[in-house]
Amino acid sequence: MYTTELQKSNQVRAIEDPEKLAAFEARVAADEFIEPKDWMPEAYRRTLTRQISQHAHSEIVGMLPEGNWISRAPSLRRKAILLAKVQDEAGHGLYLYSAAETLGTSREEMIEALHSGKAKYSTIFNYPTLTWADIGAIGWLVDGAAIMNQVPLQRTSYGPYARAMVRVCKEESFHQRQGYEIMMAMCAGTADQKRMAQDALNRWWWPSLMMFGPPDADSPNTAQSMRWRIKRETNDELRQKFVDITVPQAEALGLKVPDPALEWNEARGHYDFGEVDWEEFYAVVRGEGPVAKERMAARREAWEEGAWVRDAAAAYAEKQAAKKAA
Ligand code: FAQ
């Protein structure tokens, strides 16, 4: 059972110095950035460490489904673009681990939490990439959902996270366009290519909606994170925005969104859409996604095989420090 919002808020108030807490909350309310050496409530530090490190893990695990297609991209141009995109994701992971480290948890601890299954990463990366059209669908939908979630995070209250998001968002918008351009090429191609594009949309649509997290009513973290301006929009608000922007893009491609309940609601000025399969979402969060085991095995192997690089870098740094001291 999750702790209720009121219990959480009472715990924070019971533990923290009331004057410091009030001053902190006033700064957040005035939209000031909180910086690493500033005083912050422990729960704020914990929530940010959790969210930023899980975001970093998602970027790194997110390299795997697409990395799988680098050697099979259909042309040199596509290969070069995909290679650059996957490298960008590594860069995002690195900025994010650095931002999380400023809160006092080491990179090794975060990686250990990922490898032991204690830390989460986005559910979306537990689905397989079966055809080239999946690479288009990932750029269009997955990067599209990521941007929708990350643009507001450029105004998150923690300075290092907000600044990392500025660069990440610029790169993600290039990623989204490259994905949409793959979909455009496939939809303007042969009947088989268009069928592949539709099949990719069918398989990636619902998992993309899951990326925004559980409905607000079932989200244990949203209310406090909104109050502390860690999150600037709720899971449901962002999911709705994503649907509203993406449905016309599917129509422009001549593709059908796989949701019979999808309908423009004139009165609301938004699309109504069907219920996400939340049981599937929670199963994937628990580590039961279709390729979850493969993803974690690949990450562990990469970590172990990269040990010599980390050791060499540490030995080099030690040598340089000794030289400087002498
Ligand atoms: N997957 O109370 P909430 C990308 C967990 S980056 C797994 O609503 P919160 C780039 C959540 O952690 C994609 N777990 O939680 C790319 C919490 O569990 P905990 C990643 C999920 O934090 C593209 C519990 O459920 N983006 O794609 C998910 O307030 C292409 C309850 O949920 C970010 O991480 C999920 N989908 O809101 C790379 C953005 N949803 O930790 C390669 C930053 C929820 O308490 C290729 N993060 N959970 O045990 C966020 O904005 C938030 O953390 C949310 C979740 C919105 C994801």
Image (spheres, rainbow, N blue to C red):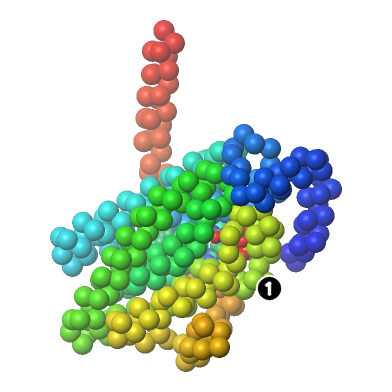
**Is residue 215 shown left or right of residue 309?**
right
**Is residue 167 shown left or right of residue 269?**
left
In the figure, residue 3 lies in which quadrant?
bottom right
Residue 103 point in image, percent of width and height: 60, 40
Q: Residues within 10 Å of mark 1 (few under 14, many from 20)?
A: few
Residue 280 point in image, percent of width and height: 55, 76
Q: Secondary structure at mark 1?
A: helix
Does residue 77 appear anywhere in the picture? yes
Q: Quadrant of the C terminus?
A: top left
Q: Is mark 1 within 8 Å of ligand 1?
A: no
Ligand 1 quadrant assignment: bottom right
> Residue at 46% across / 78% down in the picture?
244
Looking at this rendering, what residue extends furthest in the bottom direction?
A: 260
For residue 31, above or below residue 177:
above
On the image, numbered disc 1 is attached to which residue? 217
In the figure, residue 186 lies in which quadrant?
bottom left
Residue 75 point in image, percent of width and height: 15, 64
**Is residue 309 shown left or right of residue 283?**
left
For residue 172, above or below residue 311:
below
> Residue at 36% across / 36% down in the picture?
309
Mark 1 residue type: Ala
> Residue at 58% across / 60% down in the picture?
232
Does residue 295 appear anywhere in the picture? no
In the figure, residue 226 lies in which quadrant?
bottom right
Residue 76 point in image, percent of width and height: 15, 60
> Residue at 30% across / 86% down in the picture?
254
